[in-house]
Image: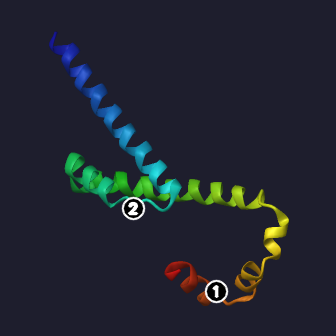
Amino acid sequence: MQDYMEILEHSQAIFKFVLLLLTNLIINAIGFIPSAFLTAINLSIYGTFLGASLSLIGEVIGTQIGFHLYRKGLSKINPTWKAHSYWIRMQSSSFRLVFISIIFF
């Protein structure tokens, strides 16, 4: 009976870790939902090192997934939208101006 309880606790810990990792990936792939609350949960459950590692892995991989999803989505948009004056102005602007415009607007 004791062995069964240990196996059950171990499998619950693995399930919780995978669930938090998948939640991290989904939130970061979406891109506009803040993940600070999830980082706090990770830190409180797994401690500083493992919780921060879990958050970092989720942030990095989720951001990569989100980048590829957005890139795929932008490749499928109507080509007439690319002729819009705002899009043309953004393409002809400097990197610094585009970065500031995206961050603040």
Q: In the rendered structure, find residue 29 and report the number of the disc placed on it.
A: none
- Secondary structure state at the residue bearing disc 2: loop
Disc 1 from disc 2: Cα separation = 25 Å
Q: Residue at x 59, y 89 (%)?
A: 96
Q: Residue at x 74, y 78 (%)?
A: 87
- Secondary structure state at the residue bearing disc 1: helix
Vertical position of residue 58 compared to residue 99: above or below: above
The three-letter code of the residue at mark 1 reads: Phe
The three-letter code of the residue at mark 2 reads: Pro
Can you tell which quarter of the image residue 92 is in? Answer: bottom right
Q: x, y (%) of residue 41?
A: 26, 50
The residue singled out by tag 1 in the image is 95
Please, which residue is most extreme toward the top here?
1
Can you tell which quarter of the image residue 17 is in? Answer: top left
The residue singled out by tag 2 in the image is 34
Q: Residue at x 26, y 20 (%)?
A: 7
Q: x, y (%) of residue 42?
A: 28, 50
